[in-house]
Amino acid sequence: MQDNILNTLFNLYDITNQLDVLYKEEFGDILTKYTYTEMHCIDCIGKTENPNVTKIAKYLNLTKAGISKIIKKLIDKKSIEVYKNPDNKKETYYKLTKIGKEVFNKHLKMHENWCEKDKEFFNQFSSKKLEITFEVLNKYTKSLQTRLENIKENLK
């Protein structure tokens, strides 16, 4: 049974990746030019007050070095721009450009559409079944997070 569950989870991951690609195409050509992580970086910048590398890294659970690489790509794509706070000239912040705002809004609509379809699907199940499913998936996610943290710690 456990093998069936793991195979289903792998299939779920694969299908959601495929859906992500199709949704990107459905919601406009502009989204197809961005990776999953780039879109979520734009999402973070659009939702965060004075976003900097540290805040973005924490939001996306990535390293600062990884975020710096993504930031450079987004600047090259003219999706974000750098600014400094007049009160703190040392710190670098990011804001969305017109292109970045377009990506942000289309990405938001894509997620809203996805959530609406998910709600339709989950309405067929009782609250009790959904609670049990949530409990199992939540515990599994925490287990994976612990493994990830242990691996990161061992790599230091």
Image: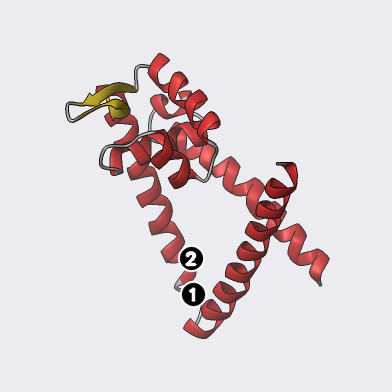
* Tags 2 and 1 touching, CB below 8 Å: yes
Amino acid type assigned to the residue bearing label 2 in the image: Phe
Is 130 or 117 nearer to us in this picture?
130
Residue lying farthest bottom? 128
Q: Is residue 43 left or right of residue 148?
A: left
Residue 102 in which image quadrant: top left
Label 2 sits on a secondary structure element that is helix
Q: Residue 8, relative to residue 134: is it above or below?
A: above
Rendering coords of residue 154 (x, y %): 75, 47
Q: Position of residue 30 (x, y in %)?
A: 39, 25
Q: Which mark is residue 112?
A: none
Residue 32, percent from left and from top: 47, 27
Dot label at residue 124: 1
Badge 2: how crowded within 10 Å, few (<14), some, or many (20+)? few
Which image quarter holds the N terminus? bottom right
Q: Residues within 10 Å of mark 1 (few under 14, many from 20)?
A: few
What residue would you read off at disc 2? 121
